[in-house]
Image: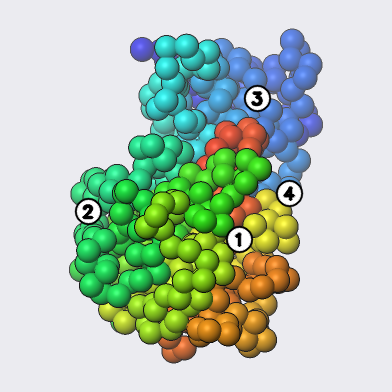
Amino acid sequence: MRSKTRVLGVWQDSKRVPTSLSQWNDACLEAISGHNFTNFTGKCGENVRIGSVLIVGLGKKGTLKRDDLRGLGGSIVRALGRRALNSASIDLHLTIPQGVVGRKELGQLVAEGMTIAAWRVDEFDGTASKRESKLGTLSVTSKSPDVVAGLTRGVILGNAVNDARRIAATPPNICNPPWMAKESKKIAKKCGLKCSIISYIQAEKLGLNGLVNVGKGSKEKPCMIILEHNPRKKKNPNEHLCFVGKTITYDTGGYSLKISNGMKGMKYDKNGGMGVLGAMEAIANLSVPARVTAILPCAENMVSSNAYRPDDIIKMFNGVTVEVTNTDAEGRLVLADGLAWACKKIKPTSIIDMATLTGGVVVALGSFCAGLWCKDAKLKKQIEKAAKETGERIWELPLWEEHRDYMRAKHADLHNSAPARGAHPIQGAAFLSFFVDENIPWAHIDIAGVSSVERDGGLYCAGPTGWGVRLLTELAESQ
């Protein structure tokens, strides 16, 4: 067992060792003087090890932001991993004053970054793999009890994000609707959530025809997963928050087939649901004093003689009829049933759906942020605050009555995709608006551009990001 590594911070271009670090004066002085370490200047994220001390650059005074602390966490865990160090004391609070960030918050943000950055898809490494071995166990503490409390919270959030990423990365030959239901039950049992499943046969009887039609072409039939967090003590007993996450375990496009390699990566079409699932895990493990229910309409969009087709007309759960113009606009059909079912059966006080819904939102916003549609001022303010706190950025797009009228069809109430691609990301939100009761505050978040990354960068390795886990958890805590 190696001795504990002390992790300390210094500001960029420091000339003197602060009094708070006098116990480690020699190590800090060696770092900031540049002796033998000419590349270390204290820029944010830079680090150098001197004896049993890891010196971390904090950047220039007055510029440190919340996301910088998450990034520092990533730099720290990678530096420890490279040196095969398995025990560390995070004591950045000795340099960073509480006026910049509170100690609990400091611990949380650093631990989020450490936990997220330490993860990669390693379940499928085989005997021919040349990739780096999985990092071992790391024991982390601090001289400050408040930092320790923050570290604990940050690890809980980071683990929930990584669980969402793990399931998102699971390939479609393993992850199908029945497997998804089993995995949800495992997570629910582990963290104390109630989990129930509406089977394919039950969904048919209930009239969840959007879900049924999207998934009926697959041998692995669709289902709807319901997770409930209902603690005895609630901050606001009358509030009942509901999340609905699109969980398409694989999307071929159906008969409107994805072509020119457009199918590659469609295992990530479940990432909205994975963000919701991860949030529910975090909410339970943090004992958030709020009632929260999550709904995961889960299906595999395949091609077969039983699959739904363009020109089909579907009567949805709430009685709205939909003419199918594009079987590749399937996510909104399963979400619509999830939303309508939630409104009728659980009657939430607010409802948020999250989905990798449209390529149009990627064209509009890139990978910089998710798209938000919300006409309720209070709910929108809560989501915007949660986005700011977590660094999971959003940008509001409009939803006008003209957009809703654009979705009306000739032979049914609505078509699932308008004849033209104009306002493409808004079409999805406009369609979904017909399945939420007008008196229930509702928000739609399209995460198609942020739910995965194609190459390593920042905290994330190539693959799913677990986007939305932290935002939705923060939102639940604000209730």
Work out whether residue 115 or residue 253 is closer to the camera in this orientation and state it. 253
Q: Is residue 411 above or below residue 269?
A: below
Q: Would you place residue 55 above or below residue 406 in this image?
A: above
Residue to which mark 4 is pinned: 62
Q: Nearer the viewer, mark 2 or mark 3?
A: 2
Residue 330 in view of the camera: yes
Foreground label between 2 and 1: 1
Query: Does residue 24 sit above or below 367 in this rendering?
Result: above
Residue 22 falls in image quadrant: top right
Identify the disc placed on residue 358: 1
First reached walking from the N terminus: tag 4 or tag 2 = 4
Looking at marks 2 and 1 on the same chain, the residue that comes earlier in the sequence is marked by: 2
What residue sits 30% from the left and 59% below the top? 223
What residue did someone put label 3 on? 47
Q: What's the mark number on residue 192? A: 2
Q: Amino acid at mark 3?
A: Asn
| Secondary structure state at the residue bearing disc 2 | loop
Q: Which mark is residue 118?
A: none
Q: Earlier in the sequence, mark 2 or mark 3?
A: 3
**Which residue type carries mark 1?**
Thr
Label 4 residue SS:
loop
Q: Is residue 283 visible?
A: no
The residue drawn where x is 60% and y is 80% is 407
Residue in the foreground of this view, choosing between 409 and 123: 409
